[in-house]
Amino acid sequence: MKIAPMNHTNQVFLHFRSQGSKVERYGLVEHTGVQAIAGSLFHEWIRTPETSDISSLEGIPFCYSENIYFLQSDGQVTHHKSAAHFRTDILAPSMGEPVLHIALVCGNRCGYGSSSQMRILGFTWLADHQCAASPCYAAQTLQLSSFLLCLAPKALEVETTAGRQVLPFDSGMLFPLAGQMGSAYTFYPGDIIALPVTPPVPPVTAVFCGSHREPLIR
């Protein structure tokens, strides 16, 4: 299956709620703040005049994925979860160190049973607090970034107890694997393909999505 180039290259999106509101919205992260958009990020959208200071917004998981496929470097799916496993509060201390993943977000319906090519909306990061390749379906074990970067992933920058580190990533490996999966799986808008990155020795305390720091849930 062919993969279409990312649209809106180099743009950063945020999924958020305004303080005191339960309304969930998407916005473009600009130097002047977050400019809200109207419509569907996965289909058609337009900018609105509304701009907010990012410090006044509550970030929420970027999308509510029907399918999250965790891969090994050889393309084997180790386990399969969904948005039902997202967690935004404090995790139990017994969960252990999370495993970080680079996550590609699908922008359209494609794959098995569909003739359309795969369109990658962008990439973000995902933390799995239920051990690396555990098939366990325990709920509330995943943390997904609130941000999406519309460019090919090259590295994941993290903050550890010993300082900041850059974890390199070969995006040339993930895109072919995503294409191969299209013959066996049907992808829907917001579905995620995730591949683990090499973990640093010191514990990770936060992950950066572009210049935006997001604390790891503990």
Image: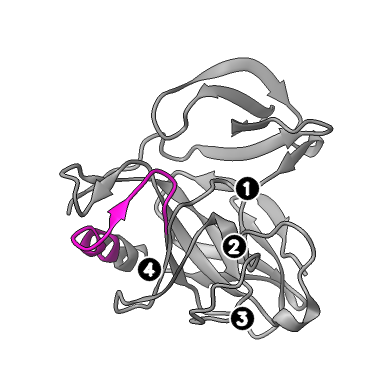
Residue 189, magenta (yes or no): yes
**Which secondary structure lies at badge 1?**
loop
Residue matched to label 1: 146
Q: Nearer the viewer, residue 114 or 154?
A: 114
Label 1 to label 3, Cα distance in Å?
22 Å
The residue drawn where x is 36% and y is 63% is 171
Which is more N-terminal, label 3 or label 1?
1
Q: Which residue is mark 2?
A: 85
Q: Is residue 154 left or right of residue 142?
A: left
Name which of mark 1 and mark 4 comes first in the sequence: 1
Q: Which residue is mark 3?
A: 200
* Residue 198 pos. (x, y %): 51, 79
Separation (CA) of disc 3 from disc 2: 24 Å
What residue appears at the point 54 percent right and 64 percent down from the top-left corner?
A: 156
Write down the region rendered in magenta: 177-192
Q: Which mark is residue 170?
A: 4
Contact, mark 1 vs mark 3 (Cβ under 8 Å): no
Question: For the residues carrying marks 3 and 2, which lies nearer the camera in this image?
Answer: 2
Instruction: Indicate which disc, 3 or 4, sits on the residue closer to the N terminus.
Output: 4
Q: Position of residue 67 (x, y in %)?
A: 43, 57
Specify the quadrant of the image occupied by residue 170: bottom left
In the picture shown, does residue 140 fall above or below 92?
above
| Circles 3, 2 touching at the beta carbon (< 8 Å) | no
